[in-house]
Amino acid sequence: MSKLGKIFLWVALVGAVAAVVAGYLVVQARTTDKSTLADAQQKQAAAEKSATLVKTQLAEAKTAQQSAEQEASDAKAKVSDLNNQLTIAQKDAADAHAAVQKAQDDAKAANDKLTDITNQMGGKTPKDYQDAVAAAQKDAADAQSQLKIIQDQYDQSQQKIKDLMADINMEKSGHEPPGVSGKVTFVDRTWNFVVLDVGLDAGVVPNGELIVYRGKTFLGKLRVTRADPNDSVAEILPDLKGNIQIGDAVLN
C-alpha cells in the first residue's frame, strides 16, 4: 500500500471513531433528556394533585363556615321567636288576670244581691223569696263557674310564661336539663366533630356540653354546635382521654 493510501486509511479510521463517539454522545444526551422530562412530568403531576387537594380543603372550609353562620342565624331567629311568644303569653296572662278580677267582682255582686234579697224578704211571699233566692244562687254559681274557668286560663298562661322563660334561658346559656342520653352515630376526626342520635326533643340545646363514655371509661367532653329535633352535631373538646368511636354513649 502506498504512503498516500495509508494516510487515507488512517483518516477513515479516525473519522469512524469520531462518528461512533458522536453517536454515543447523542444517545446519552437523548437518554438524559427523556429522564429529565419524566421527572418534570412527575413533579407537575404531584403539583397538580397538591393544588387540587388545597382547593378541596378550601371548599370544605368555606362550606363549614357557611354552615356555622347559618346555624348562628337560626339560633338568633329562634331566640327572637321565643321572645315574641313570651310577649304574647304575657299579654294573654294580663287579659286573663283582668277577666279573673271581673269574675270576682261579679261573684261578689251576686252574693251581695242574695244578701239584700234575704234582708228585704218582708212583704213578699215565700215563693217570691224562694224564686229570688234560687235566681241569685244560680247567678252566684254561674259566676263561680266562670271564675274557675278564667282562673284555670290564667294559671295556664302563667305556666306558659315560665316554660318560655326557661326555653329562652336554656337557649342563651346552653344549659341542658338532666337526663339527656344518646349515642355517637358518626365521627369526623379531620374536622373534630361527631353526630349524635339525640336532639331538641330529648333536651339537647346548642352550646350545651355532654360527656362521652364507653362502658365505664370516660373518653372526653363534647359541645353541641347544632341541634335538630332528633339529632345533633357536637364539637370534640380538647383534653380528650380516649378515641371516640361510633356507638359510644353520651350523657350530661
Image (cartoon, helix red, strand yellow):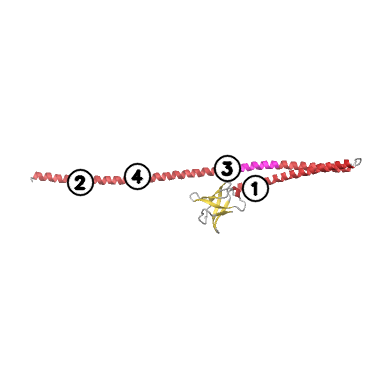
Do the residues bearing badges 3 and 4 touch, measured as CB atoms within 8 Å? no
Dot 3, crowdedness within 10 Å: few (<14), some or many (≥20)?
few
**Considering the numbered disc 2 on the image, is that residue within a helix, a strand or a loop?**
helix
Q: Amino acid at mark 4?
A: Gln
Q: Is residue 116 visible?
A: no
Calculate the distance from the C-alpha at mark 3 to the C-alpha at mark 4.
49 Å
Do the residues bearing badges 1 and 3 touch, measured as CB atoms within 8 Å? no
Q: Depth check: give the residue in front, 246 or 157.
A: 246
At a point 69% along the width and 42% down the height, the residue shown is 90
Calculate the distance from the C-alpha at mark 2 to the C-alpha at mark 3.
81 Å
Considering only order in the chain, which callout, 1 or 4, is on the residue closer to the N terminus?
A: 4
At a point 75% along the width and 45% down the height, the residue shown is 148
Instruction: Name the residue furthest left.
Output: 2
Which residue is disc 1 drawn over?
Answer: 166
Residue numbers of the magenta segment: 75-92
Q: Depth check: give the residue in front, 200 or 14.
A: 200
User: Within the magenta stretch, is there residue 203?
Assistant: no
Q: Amino acid at mark 3?
A: Asp
Residue 41 - label: 4
Residue 37 lies, in percent from the top left, at: 32, 44
Calculate the distance from the C-alpha at mark 1 to the C-alpha at mark 2.
96 Å
Do the residues bearing badges 1 and 2 touch, measured as CB atoms within 8 Å? no
Residue 120 lies, in percent from the top left, at: 89, 41
Considering only order in the chain, which callout, 3 or 2, is on the residue closer to the N terminus?
A: 2
Residue 74 - label: 3
How many discs appear?
4
